[in-house]
Image (cartoon, rainbow, N blue to C red):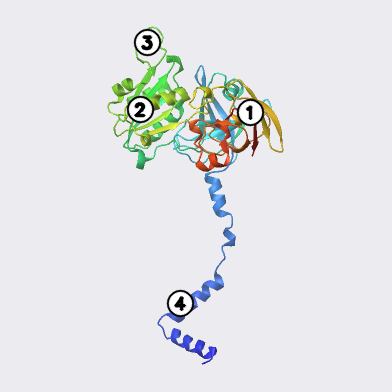
């Protein structure tokens, strides 16, 4: 039998099936009026860009004095609406200081339920290159570029539950404020206990605001602790050790802990929580930059001083001198080499560079993957060259 006969017989059989002809008619109609979706090309990317643009164009609308060492910068967008964020996230603020292009991550201290502005609350850091510039020179009207909000330091109701304790030190009050207002403004069935440690009574950020919220809301508890109290101070004093924490919050079981402050504060709080039997999955730590004294960390080479000078060679682009105790990213920026970055704490991996030759110290917060270690990649924001090195980026 010929192929033509076979085809004709098959068509006869199909045409006898109930609904076949109607289905073929609908198919043909769709082919005649359908689309290959080319008109939607780029739509998904554009929608994503609206929700999470790579860069934000911001302007300082107001500068608010919080304490003698702390200011809040209220930032509005000059190019479209501000994207949404999770309470506890940060933006990376890009600055140019005397010709040096650099950036620093700052937690958004305002509540995500309003998006007319972002508040960034900045506390002076001893020897801080960027904080000194911001606090001394930035006025209303100044414009900045920043990343969209990012970071994983926020409440996840599925995994973190509804019994939350925030251990804040100094500037750690910024993300705490955003989280607390988010919980209280939405009326969530969550118990939130802020244990706020500061050096001096006069330097407590958002003190009046936190106290007022604690008076108004039964599910928000505030405990203020001063480590260097003035004479006659009658409040809680000392450090957030396990004994003090237990006296303030009771048993640790079932609670999720958020920790944010200077690196030594974070490390001490983590050690105390672990001594109380808190599991790693119940401790959320927001790192604030590279370690201040990397030579004090385990596995630092004994014969190397932070003041030693080494040579950093950037393959095909030049070389420069740097101190061992300076993070590689900082020295690259100082010498005119821009590396994409965001967290500056070893978490996001945007600032990775490949070490072709030489030795680099990577602290625990570097969070290097096995493949990074195998092929020589480091997170430059928390990498400390301990010998002359050559890198590729």
Identify the residue at horizontal 56%, vertical 46% (top origin). 49
Q: Which mark is residue 393?
A: none
Residue on which the image places disc 1: 331
In the rendered image, the vertical position of residue 222 relative to residue 81, given as above or below: above
Using the rendered view, name the quadrant where residue 19 is placed.
Answer: bottom left
State the quadrant of the C terminus: top right
- Report if the CB atoms under discs 3 and 1 are less than 8 Å apart: no
Q: Earlier in the sequence, mark 1 or mark 2?
A: 2
Q: Nearer the viewer, mark 1 or mark 4?
A: 1
Which SS class for mark 4? Answer: helix
Does residue 197 appear to the left or right of 94 in the view shown?
Answer: left
Residue named by callout 4: 23
- Residue at far front of view: 303
Q: Nearer the viewer, mark 3 or mark 1?
A: 1
Cα distance in 3D space between marks 3 and 1: 43 Å
Q: Verify CB contact (< 8 Å) between mark 4 and mark 2.
A: no
User: In the image, which is nearer the foreground, mark 4 or mark 2?
Assistant: 2
The mark tally for this picture is: 4
Q: Cα distance, mark 1 to mark 2? A: 35 Å
Give the mark nearer the N terminus: 1 vs 4.
4
- Structural crowding at the residue carrying mark 4, measured as other residues with C-alpha within 10 Å and reported as few (<14), some (14–19) or many (≥20): few
Q: Quarter of the image holding residue 356?
A: top right
Percent of width and height locating residue 102: 62, 30
**Dot 1 alpha-carbon crowd within 10 angstroms: few under 14, some 14 to 19, many 20 or more:** some
Kindly identify which residue carries mark 2: 273
Q: Helix, strand, or loop for circle 2?
A: helix
Q: In percent of the image, x 39 and y 37: which residue is there? A: 155
Label 1: element kind: helix
Q: Are marks 4 and 3 in contact (CB under 8 Å)?
A: no
């Amino acid at each position: 039998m010929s192929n033509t006969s076979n085809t004709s017989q098959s068509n006869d059989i199909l045409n006898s099936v109930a609904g076949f002809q109607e289905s073929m008619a609908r198919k043909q109609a769709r082919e005649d009026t359908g689309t290959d979706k080319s008109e939607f090309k780029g739509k998904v990317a554009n929608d994503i860009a609206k929700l999470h643009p790579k860069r934000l164009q911001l302007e300082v609308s107001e500068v608010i004095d919080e304490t003698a060492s702390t200011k809040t910068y209220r930032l509005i967008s000059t190019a479209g609406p501000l994207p949404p964020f999770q309470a506890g996230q940060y933006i990376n603020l890009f600055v140019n200081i005397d010709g040096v292009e650099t950036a620093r991550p700052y937690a958004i201290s305002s509540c995500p339920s309003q998006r007319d502005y972002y508040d960034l609350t900045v506390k002076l850091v001893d020897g801080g290159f960027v904080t000194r510039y911001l606090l001394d020179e930035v006025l209303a009207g100044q414009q900045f570029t920043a990343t969209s909000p990012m970071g994983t330091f926020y409440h996840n109701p599925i995994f973190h539950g509804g019994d939350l304790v925030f251990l804040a030190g100094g500037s750690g009050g910024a993300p705490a404020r955003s989280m607390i207002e988010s919980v209280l403004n939405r009326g969530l069935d969550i118990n939130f206990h802020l244990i706020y440690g500061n050096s001096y009574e006069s330097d407590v950020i958002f003190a009046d605001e936190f106290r007022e919220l604690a008076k108004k809301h039964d599910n928000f508890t505030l405990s203020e602790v001063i480590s260097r109290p003035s004479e006659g101070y009658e409040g809680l004093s000392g450090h957030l050790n396990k004994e003090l924490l237990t006296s303030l919050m009771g048993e640790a079981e079932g609670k999720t802990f958020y920790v944010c402050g200077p690196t030594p504060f974070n490390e001490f709080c983590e050690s105390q929580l672990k001594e109380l039997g808190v599991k790693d999955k119940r401790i959320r730590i927001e790192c604030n930059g590279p370690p201040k004294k990397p030579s004090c960390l385990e596995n630092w080479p004994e014969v190397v001083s932070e003041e030693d000078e080494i040579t950093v060679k950037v393959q095909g682009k030049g070389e420069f001198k740097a101190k061992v105790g300076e993070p590689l990213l900082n020295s690259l920026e100082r010498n005119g080499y821009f590396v994409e970055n965001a967290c500056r704490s070893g978490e996001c991996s945007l600032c990775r560079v490949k070490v072709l030759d030489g030795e680099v110290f990577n602290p625990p917060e570097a969070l290097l993957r096995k493949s990074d270690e195998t092929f020589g990649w480091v997170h430059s924001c928390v990498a400390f060259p301990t010998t002359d090195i050559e890198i590729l980026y």
